[in-house]
Amino acid sequence: MQKQSISFEIIDSFGVLSESPKGWRKEVNLVSWNGGKPKYDIRDWAPDHSKMGRGITLSAQEMDALKKVLEEKI
């Protein structure tokens, strides 16, 4: 099975949540994956953004729902 190439463009960066000793950073960004509609994205990135870890992508509606849930609990 051939490994598929994933393209991405970071449209906007919102901030860094944490950084590992090796320099990888857990970031919140708005990312377009494979030319698609940009989504909110939380994942680990290598210092130069050449590699990424597993993460989560959220639509604008899901991000609004997450924000409301957190505001109610924090």
Image (cartoon, rainbow, N blue to C red):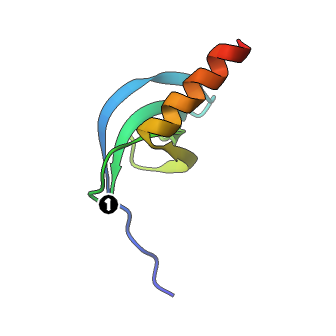
Q: Is residue 8 left or right of residue 62?
A: left
Q: Is residue 35 left or right of residue 16?
A: left
Residue 17 occupies quadrant = top right
Q: Residue furthest bottom?
A: 1
Where is mark 1, residue-wise? 34
Front-lying residue, 66 or 22 = 66
Residue 28: x percent and y percent?
Answer: 47, 30
Whether residue 74 can be seen here: yes
Name which residue lies at 59% across and 30% down.
Answer: 66
Element type at mark 1? loop
Residue 36: x percent and y percent?
Answer: 30, 56
Residue 29: x percent and y percent?
Answer: 41, 33
Name which residue lies at 42% across and 37% down.
Answer: 60
Q: Residue furthest top?
A: 74
> Vertically, is 18 above or below 35?
above
Residue 47: x percent and y percent?
Answer: 44, 35
Q: Is residue 15 left or right of residue 38?
A: right
> Vertically, is 19 above or below 62?
above
Quadrant in which the C terminus appears: top right
| Kind of residue sitting beneath label 1 | Asn
